[in-house]
Amino acid sequence: MKLLIINASPRKNGNISKRLELMKDEAERAGVSVFVEYSQSFKIRPCIGCMKCRSAKNCVLPEDDAQRMLDLIQECDAVIIGSPTYWGNMPGTLKLLFDRIVYGLMDENSLAIPVPLHKGKKALIVCTSSTPWPFNILMGQTRGVVRAIKEVLGTAGFKVSSIQRGGTKKHPEITKKDIRLCQKAVRRLIGR
Ligand SMILES: Cc1cc2nc3c(=O)[nH]c(=O)nc-3n(C[C@H](O)[C@H](O)[C@H](O)COP(=O)(O)O)c2cc1C
């Protein structure tokens, strides 16, 4: 089994990175091959909105990290996306990727209704915010991030679950409960 982890936080020792590290270790202990990518270091040109990829099944822009990442997503059985909350949404570095690889995530039928290309795969979203619980949920902070990423991965056919943790400004520490949650979510994701 192959697992792709995309870290959308630029902080190498931040809230998301620590959780993703735990998850990587847990998956590797179970014999899974894990690939880790950082959206902060992607070299990806923004989508120009020409819509040509919808029929050509390729992007008109010169090849960059968007195609490399799409190849990885296609090769992997499961994906973990770790994302901090930026303005109640995902960081721009991650959105840039998703905008450029629409054609590899979904097809369209004759009525322009999306047809998923990754049915049968699973995804896990890990999200943190400085807004504390329950306002990270009630005020659409981590919930906004999960909704936005789910829009992409759900449309692509992934079965999506999530971990949302608010209050990282006051409580940046990883508790025993956090560790248990992360490890359990990964085991469920990889079916062990
Ligand atoms: C540019 C930027 C925008 C942010 N926007 C929000 C926000 O809208 N809501 C929120 O609760 N926290 C916001 N935060 C705080 C982060 O989501 C929070 O500190 C998160 O836990 C950081 O995770 P990290 O340490 O993995 O980077 C923002 C942080 C930055 C740098």
Image (cartoon, rainbow, N blue to C red):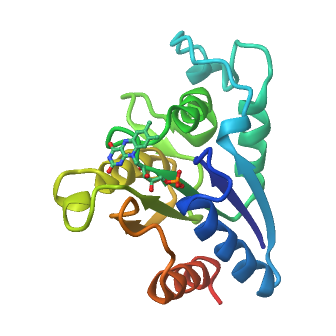
Whether residue 24 can be seen here: yes
Outermost residue, front direction?
170
Does 9 sit left or right of 170 as displayed?
right
Q: Position of residue 153 (x, y in %)?
A: 49, 51
Based on the displayed image, in which of its 4 quarters is residue 107 positioned?
Answer: top right
Quadrant (top left, top right, bottom left, bottom right) of the C terminus? bottom right
Looking at the image, which is closer to me, 60 or 37? 37
Outermost residue, left direction?
138
The residue shown at (50%, 55%) is: 157
Looking at the image, which is closer to me, 53 or 99? 99
- 92 shown above or below 60: below
Based on the displayed image, in which of its 4 quarters is residue 183 positioned?
Answer: bottom right
Q: Position of residue 85 (x, y in %)?
A: 40, 48
Does 112 sit left or right of 118 as displayed?
left
The residue shown at (59%, 64%) is: 121
Tally the numbered discs.
0
The residue shown at (74%, 78%) is: 25
- 188 shown above or below 147: below
Does 39 sit left or right of 175 as displayed?
right
The residue shown at (23%, 61%) is: 137
Does 136 sit left or right of 125 as displayed?
left
Quadrant (top left, top right, bottom left, bottom right) of the N terminus? bottom right
- 191 shown above or below 107: below
Q: Position of residue 63 (x, y in %)?
A: 80, 21
Q: Position of residue 136 (x, y in %)?
A: 26, 58
